[in-house]
Amino acid sequence: MTSAVTTANGVASPLNHGQLRARLAAGEKTVGTFLGTASAVTAEVCAAAGVDWVLLDLEHGAGGEEQVGAVVIAAAAYEVPTVVRAESAARIRLGRVLDLGAAGVMLPRQDTAVEVREALRHLRYPPDGDRGVATYNRACRFGLDPGALDRANTEILALVQIESARAVEHVEEIAALDGVDVLFVGPRDLSHDLGVPGDMQAPSYLAALDRVRTAAQRFGRGCGLLVPDGAAAAERHKQGWTFVAIGSDSTLLAAALDAELAQARGPG
């Protein structure tokens, strides 16, 4: 375990300072996992295992904004950034998780470029946006780094979820927006909305995936997807997906224990 993490002006900090955003902008392939348990200890375990990022899920996960701070610190001890899927794209919700030190925000269920453009404003300080300005938080090192206000607009990672047929129809317009860093497909949501719930081999679903990936690559954005295991992640990386999530902490734990119990109890 390391005692120092990424630094700003030579001072140790749990903040990522735009490094994850820069990696994705350069086309690097990354892999992480969702945190559904909202546990700082689980976040640390995932970080210790070597993920490139953890994604704290406030939409479907067990926790809330009160867990963000602890998760950021636990993962940052291993120099792993925390991305947060906010419970909504409301201005106050996005600002809260950014002030707590999130390296980026995943915006759930964004269907049009108009919706995305408005949400992106909430990630930026004026005059580029309408994020609330304060310095007495982790993002500004509790007032010790007021210059963070000048850097933040270029450091925050913005992930837009493509989870509906409508979003797929508008995906090129969404990808073209300044400030969009990653287009992330929610497989279950998208398959349900396409009328093929859970069928990841349905022609309509595969065509939607291809359209999202093509749009991301055309506009120089990262493209992300949730997959069940490492083999699937490796395959998606080969296809050009750059922000790949392998399950979640709870599903990975449940699957591992289920497999071990099956062996322990045997066929009888």
Image: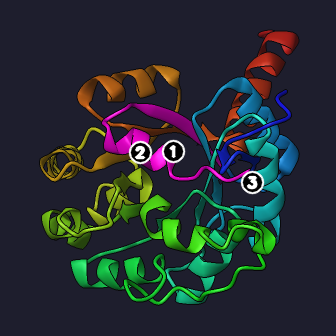
126 to 245, vertically: above or below: below
User: In the picture provided, is 229 more to the left or to the right than 224?
Assistant: right
Where does label 1 land, which residue? Answer: 19
Q: Quadrant of the C terminus?
A: top right
- The residue segment tinted magenta is 14-34
Asked whether disc 3 touches disc 2, contact meaning CB atoms under 8 Å apart, the reply is no
Residue 64 in view in this figure: no
Which quadrant of the view contains residue 267?
Answer: top right
Residue hosting label 3:
72
Q: Position of residue 49 (x, y in %)?
A: 72, 25
> How far, Cα to Cα, is label 3 from label 2?
19 Å
Q: Quadrant of residue 166?
A: bottom left
Q: Is residue 72 above or below residue 27?
A: below
Residue 15 sits inside the magenta stretch? yes
Disc 3 or disc 1, which is closer to the eye? 1
Q: Say which of 37 and 240 sits in front.
A: 240
Within-10-Å neighbours for mark 3: few <14, some 14–19, many 20+: many
Find numbered disc 1 in the image and state the secondary structure of the residue it sits on. Answer: helix
Tell me which residue sits at (21%, 62%) in the image.
175
